[in-house]
Amino acid sequence: MKKSTKVAAAVLAAAMSTSVLAGCGLVTTNISKDYAQVIAEVNITNSANFASSEYADYADVIETSEITKRDMVAYFISTGYSMMQSYGWTYYDTFNMISQTLVNRQVYIQYAMLYLLDDETEDFSAEEYRAAVDAAEEGDKALAALGYFLSDTERAKALYDTRVLFNTSLDSQETAYIEEESGTSSTETARTTPTGVNTEDEDYYDEAYRVYTGSNAAANCGGYETQDGSTPTTRRKAYGAFLASLRSNDLVTAGEDTSDIESLVYFKMELENSYETAIINKMTDKFETAIKATVTQEVAQQVYDTTYSRQQRAFDADLSTFTSALDGVSDTSFVLTAPEPNYGFVVNILLPFSTTQTQALESASADFGDTKGNKFNQRADLLAAVRGTDQRGTWFTGTEDYSFRVNAESAVDNVYIGGDASREYLFFEDSLLDSTQYERIPNYYGRYTYNGSVRKNDRDEYVLTPNRISIDEFIREMEGYLSQAASAVTGEDAYTVSGGSYVSSIGADDAITPAQDNSAYYNRSVSEYYNADGTVDYSKFVYYAGKVDFGTNGFDANEMFLEGSAENVAYSVINELSFAYNTDTAGLNSYLGYSVTTGRTSYMAEFEYAAQLACRLGAGNYVVVPTDYGWHVIYCTFSFVSDGNGGVADPYTFIWDDIDREGTFSYYFYEALVADLVSDYASNMQNDAIDTYLDCAVVYADRYADLSGLDTATS
């Protein structure tokens, strides 16, 4: 699916329910008359530069845009208040920012209209534009002027976005009433969810979607879903509070029909904002098309080669530059080489000691015969009793229930139940299956059932009992799930899970000697934990090791994020298991996991050794090792490997034919390149337009001096 940068629609802030301005004590005169004042006028044709511009022939098209004090208040409520709180701005700073923003936006919108009228690739004309505006009702002419430049689909999408905006605001207000009526509030912190959950496709809209006010039926609001515990009463209360706030700020006036929310002037104000945003997006898309025409294969390859060479020089000169870049790797920030092999990334899944076990370890005396004071045998005894549990319980019981029951109607294939037929719940149905509304969750396979029992009590509340599993049971779950998921690979070579065994010893060349079982691990003598020179032999702590084998061609970093590739399916399985069991929550939603360097690190020594070992063995290798926190299951997602000649093999290759294959390295590199160019180009175009024509604006700052002066009035 094509992705591009879009200007997000403003979200109604919490300020809406606080009547910020109405409570300031300054609004004592005729508020309607006061807010109707024009605080700025914008007409691009009045600029000294317009007559000599390429748009001079359209001088009779643009009409003056009047920005009212009411527009300022609406912007303050929807956006300005939250920005003020976030950045610590004064009222003076905030309202001057709002004035400048509204003026600049109107200058650019008028410029965009002229740009589109003059665009030979579009079928727009001044005559048709004037006819569309003349045909509109008096109160709808501004919408008609903007809407002329949008397709039916773009207008429908803007309307949908506006309706969602209002429902979202009402949802927030209604939640408070639901908790008030039930006498309870949600205090349970839901477990982190994967990035991308419930993310709508950027082009999706539902024509049947409506704003639910409680006076209409929720069932008649298309795809809108009510809040848990919602009733018509709680929704009407929320809508009443919403209207009260609008009235207090003169955003709803006497005579307006509040039973029809879409007839409100304020709704049309927000719809105009959505139309304006759609026009800006349309301009950005045109800029993207123009930029892509200039980025040829030769240009893209040159940028790749230049980036590679620059990184190579910088990394060789300063290791900290490399490690910093490694920590910042993302879909738009790439590390193409390394100063030496074996740097990489690992996912860490921590199955922790319980509080009681941690206390027991802290209070335990040193192992008998250990003159260094270590507790390796004592810890091993406690490790045998560690039990992990599925951490996704709050995905049932949190503020949102993400669960769904797997059955024939759910149409989810390859579900993993670990041999337990009673395990039948999965999560994120909307984002898991093919959907026109929601994007699929990236890097999350999604077929691992909740590991425990699920039932509901007589109050229709979930009662969850997670299964308690040992490290050996977790390993079986992981390897079983990895093996089953391999059938989902759509490429030529599926992976296999091979080499899994308990560890007897690890040689200096990282060769692993397998153990028959885990019994020797728990029965080592104290001396076996040490080298001949008395230093700790951290290889002795590696409990288990295995590998995802990517076949004869090996691991291909170019396809790490390509849905259906062996690399991505395996990573998606490990990522999902991390969400299921990992109590190291800092590792959730990391791009490739924790970065691992080749020297001393800040990680605990056992973890450091095992993570570095996994990176030396290469992507797909996994090891199990303990620390004083519990068991760590460490999976290498990516590492820089040796080229066999003392250097580093290049993990990536820029392939022009792959720039349209979403998920490939070449796709992301190309998209990042284009996005940067488009962003710069769009920003320059907008700044140039504003700088060129800003003299067309007349601002009456004295008319909103009471607002920008609130700091003094309220001090």
Image (cartoon, rainbow, N blue to C red):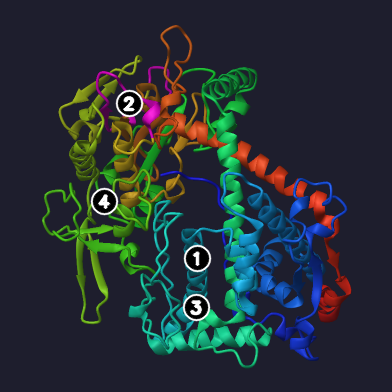
User: In this figure, which residue is indicated by the disc labeled 2?
Assistant: 527
Asked whether the residues under the numbered discs 2 and 3 touch, taking CB atoms below 8 Å apart as contact, a structural biologist would say no
Dot 3 amino acid type: Leu
Of marks 2 and 1, the one in the foreground: 1
Q: Position of residue 408 (x, y in %)?
A: 13, 59
Give the Cα distance between marks 2 and 3: 67 Å
Q: Position of residue 523 (x, y in %)?
A: 23, 34
Give the Cα distance between marks 3 and 4: 43 Å
User: In this figure, which residue is indicated by the disc labeled 1?
Assistant: 161
Residue at 63% x, 46% y is 119
Q: Left of 164 or right of it: where is 69?
A: right
| Mark found first going from the N terminus, 2 or 1 | 1
Dot 4 amino acid type: Arg
Q: Secondary structure at mark 2?
A: helix
Q: Secondary structure at mark 1?
A: helix
User: In this figure, which residue is indicated by the disc labeled 4?
Assistant: 387
Of marks 4 and 2, the one in the foreground: 4
| Mark found first going from the N terminus, 1 or 4 | 1
Residue furthest to the front? 127
User: In this figure, which residue is indicated by the disc labeled 3?
Assistant: 170
Quadrant position of residue 254: bottom right
Q: Residues within 10 Å of mark 1 (few under 14, many from 20)?
A: many
| Mark found first going from the N terminus, 3 or 1 | 1
588 or 388, which is in the foreground? 588
Give the Cα distance between marks 4 and 2: 28 Å
